[in-house]
Structures are given as structure tokens and as C-alpha cells.
Amino acid sequence: MTLTNERNLSDALPGALPRHVAIIMDGNGRWAARRHLPRVAGHRQGVEAVRVIVRAAGELGIEYLTLYGFSSENWKRPAEEVSDLMGLLRLFIRRDLAELHQNGVQVRVIGDRDHLDLDIVALIDEAEALTRNNDRLKLQIAFNYGGQNEIAAAMRRIAREVKAGRLDPEAITPELVSGFLDTAGIPDPDLIIRTSGEKRLSNFLIWQGAYAELVFSDALWPDFTPERLREAVAEYCGRSRRFGGLDATGPAGQS
Ligand code: IPE
Ligand code: IPE
Ligand code: MG
């Protein structure tokens, strides 16, 4: 795996960097199949790519990185694969937490924790508590995450507030709804990247991504390198974001 140095990664990008990059890390299974390996081998290699890309995102100067690790629909997979993916999250937190913390990475996990094993919930709590005050790179891991579930859960909480007389229905604005999502306090993603050539969101950040720029990479996730991340960011930098208005503020600039 090639690792470029900091200067190469951050040099000469034309225009404003995305503050928040979110990645749908797809293609682990196909990476393994091409090598006649079991799918879990692709997921393991996918974790290696996570390590490299987290570092590269920090070097590029990205503030927020959100990685889609397990969707609320991924429970449909064979039990053995689900258990392998749970095991890899455990391993990732156990093995990488200290280093992430040393490097100033703040870790937050978004998604439904209620149906995760208790030891995993404990690890997630530990990771979040240890890194709470870090601010070099904010890393969100979407695990047992689905945008529709997230929005439904937010609606339940909002409805309870209304029912209890603490919230006027007229006060329900997009900003208020955002504050009830798992991503409360995190700016919306500027750039969503999906690897492996698939062109869909698969229930990822469907509220928050309303005005995200989408970049699709043909690389399978285990093959996604810092150079490819830089290419995706460069493509973003060349885009003109209008947010429904007419004034293009230049490449990817927000007014
Ligand atoms: C992405 O790789 C990882 C998860 C969805 C957990 P896949 O496992 O979806 O790989 P493909 O799409 O089958 O190649
Ligand atoms: C999306 O990938 C979920 C993650 C990357 C964690 P999938 O492989 O599950 O998506 P579909 O099923 O192809 O839409
Ligand atoms: Mg897939």
C-alpha cells in the first residue's frame, strides 16, 4: 500500500476543502472473491484501509470523517458474516483506540446501539469517553446505522416532547430535526464517497446528505488508497455548489 507524505497529500488542491467527508466503504466481499478468499478476508483488509484512510484524512486537513461500517440492513447477511463484522469492530476499537487517542482523534459511533452486544456497547462508550475532548480529526463510525431508522427515532423523540407539552409543533424546523439525529452537532457532509462502483446511498446520511457532493470510485474499499481519497477530494474541489441558488461561489466554495 502506497502512503504519500503529508505534503503530497495536502498540496495544491484548488478551492475549499470539504469540512466533512463521509465514505460508504463498499466492495470488501468482491475484493475477497477476486482472490478466492472468504468474505471475512475482505472485511479484514477493509479494516487496514480504514486505518490508512483515517490517517490520510487528518493529513489532508479534513475535520470530520464519517465511515459507514455496518448498515441496519446488513443483519440480512449470513449470521457468520454478521458475527465476523461485529468481531472486527471489537478488534478495531481494542487495537486502535490508544493510537487514535494519541493522534488527537475524537471517536463517535452513530447508529442504533440497542441491538448490539453489551460488550460492544461498552467498548463504544469507552472509545467515546476517552476521546471526547480531542479535536484534531472527528471520526464518526456508522455502525448498525440506517438513515430511515435514525429519522424515525428522531420523530419518536420529537413526538414525546410535543406530547409532554415541552415542544410546540410549529417549532419543528429542519434545524430542530437535525438536533434530534445521531449526528447532532456535526456539520452535514460536504462530500459523500462510495467505493466499488455502486451508485446508491444505501440508507446512509439521507437527511444530512441533502446537499452533499457525491463521488463514486470504482476502487473496491480494501484498494482505496490515500491517493484515491485525494482524487475524490480534488473532484469535490472542482465542483460548483449552489444550494439551490444561482450564485456559484466558485469551486466547491460555500458562500
Ligand atoms: C462493504 O463491503 C462492507 C459492509 C457492507 C459491511 P461488502 O461486504 O458489501 O462487499 P461487497 O459489496 O459484497 O463486495
Ligand atoms: C452499504 O453497503 C453498507 C456499508 C458499506 C456498511 P452494502 O453492500 O450493504 O449496500 P447494498 O446492499 O449493496 O446497497
Ligand atoms: Mg456491498
Image (tube, helix red, strand yellow):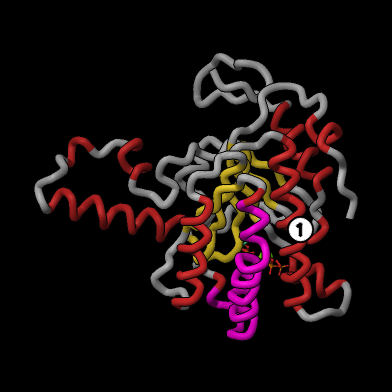
Determine whether, in the image, residue 128 is placed left or right of residue 27: left
Residue at 58% of width from left, 75% of height from top? 86
Q: Which SS class for mark 1?
A: helix
Q: Quadrant of residue 135?
A: top right
Q: In this figure, which residue is indicated by the disc labeled 1?
A: 49
Residue at 49% of width from left, 63% of height from top? 126
Task: Give the residues drawn in magenta, as a range.
Answer: 75-101
Residue 4 placement (x, y as % from top left): 87, 42
Q: Quadrant of residue 169?
A: top left
Query: Of all residues shown, which one is farthest toward the left?
Result: 165
Residue 97 placement (x, y as % from top left): 62, 60
Which quadrant holds the C terminus? top right
Decide whether the magenta segment is chiefly helix, strand or loop: helix
Q: 165 above or below 42?
A: above
Determine whether, in the image, residue 224 is placed left or right of residue 161: right
The reply to whether the magenta stretch includes residue 150 is no
Q: Quadrant of ligand 3?
A: bottom right
Inspect the image, locate mark 1, and give the three-letter code of the amino acid beneath it: Ala
Q: Quadrant of residue 76?
A: bottom right
Q: How many numbered marks have been drawn onto this rendered protein structure?
A: 1
Q: 144 above or below 201?
A: below
